[in-house]
């Protein structure tokens, strides 16, 4: 059993969205219009971090060409997206299996059902990062930018000499100063507070 962590509302995705305050009280078509309007925000938010993204892409390409690997670390929605991306890179770009590795807090079981508490354990992230080497790239994915599992993994990867990056939906992410590159994509408050499978996941 893990102690309940205090609820913190300093991540942008956790704030109330003034544009969708009435989402519970409007007809279905208006709900869909509100969600669709919010869906337009991520593309512009990504545009703002393209220079840092180019740095991460170039460094990743250089290290993979030299025999390194790309490791993703995430929990919940972030981890599931990492697994999906790693799997899709193989058929899309004829990338050999094992070049891109997705580490999801809680393992395979957590892909289809919640595994409580594992995302709050830095030690689990550090253990999952044990295979990261100095020629690798480690990318942590965390909407809040503070997930302990991701933090533990990134610290271990950095200590091993890997190039590290954080992808978050929080420009002021706590973990930002512990990585080489932070892609803090400012998608703002979710249409439904905290539902990061919506804009942040996009």
Image (cartoon, grey):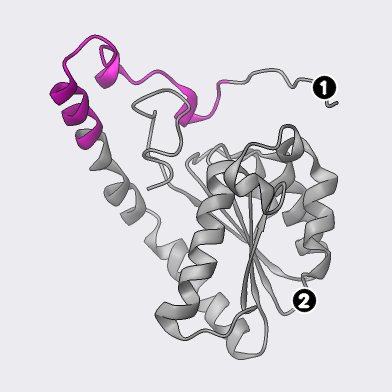
Residue 81 vertical placement versus 138 (above, below): above
The answer to whether residue 132 is above or below residue 43 is: below
Q: Is residue 39 above or below residue 190?
A: below
Q: Position of residue 122 (x, y in %)?
A: 80, 43
Q: Secondary structure at mark 1?
A: loop
Looking at the picture, how far across and down is residue 73, in whole percent? 65, 55
Cα separation, mark 2 vs mark 1, equals 34 Å
Q: In the rendering, at what x and y percent does residue 188 appear?
A: 38, 33
Q: Which residues are magenta?
A: 9-36
Q: Residues within 10 Å of mark 2 (few under 14, many from 20)?
A: some
Residue 186 appears in view: yes
Left or right: where 74 falls relative to 187: right
Indicate the secondary structure of the residue bearing disc 2.
loop
- Residue visible at 64% across and 36% down in the picture: 114
> Mark 2 — residue?
134
Count of numbered circles on the image: 2
| Residue 2 within the segment the image draws in magenta | no
Indicate which disc residue 13 carries.
none
Q: Is residue 26 magenta?
A: yes
Residue appearing at x 46%, y 62% in the figure = 52
Q: Residue at x 14, y 25 (%)?
A: 29
Mark positioned earlier in the residue sequence (2 or 1): 1
Q: Quadrant of the N terminus?
A: top right
Structural crowding at the residue carrying mark 1, measured as other residues with C-alpha within 10 Å and reported as few (<14), some (14–19) or many (≥20): few
From the viewer's side, name the closer residue of 45 and 143.
Answer: 143
Q: Nearer the viewer, residue 2 or 122?
A: 2
Vertical relation: 148 (above or below) 66: above
Left or right of 57 on screen, residue 6: right
- In the rendered image, which residue does mark 1 sit on? 3
């Amino acid at each position: 059993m893990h102690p309940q962590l205090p609820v913190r509302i300093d991540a942008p995705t956790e704030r109330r969205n003034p544009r969708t305050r009435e989402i519970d009280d409007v007809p279905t078509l208006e709900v869909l219009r509100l969600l669709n309007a919010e869906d337009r925000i991520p593309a512009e938010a990504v545009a703002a971090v393209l220079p840092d993204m180019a740095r991460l892409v170039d460094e990743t390409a250089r290290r993979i060409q030299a025999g390194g690997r790309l490791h993703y670390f995430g929990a919940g929605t972030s981890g599931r997206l990492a697994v999906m991306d790693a799997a899709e890179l193989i058929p899309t770009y004829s990338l050999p299996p094992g070049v891109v590795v997705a580490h999801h807090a809680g393992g395979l079981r957590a892909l289809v059902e919640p595994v409580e508490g594992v995302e709050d354990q830095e030690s689990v992230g550090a253990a999952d990062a044990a295979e990261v080497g100095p020629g690798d790239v480690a990318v942590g994915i965390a909407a809040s930018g503070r997930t302990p599992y991701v933090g533990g993994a990134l610290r271990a990867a950095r200590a091993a000499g890997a190039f590290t990056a954080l992808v978050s939906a929080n420009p002021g992410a706590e973990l930002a100063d512990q990585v080489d590159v932070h892609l803090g994509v400012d998608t703002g408050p979710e249409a439904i507070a905290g539902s990061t499978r919506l804009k942040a996941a996009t």
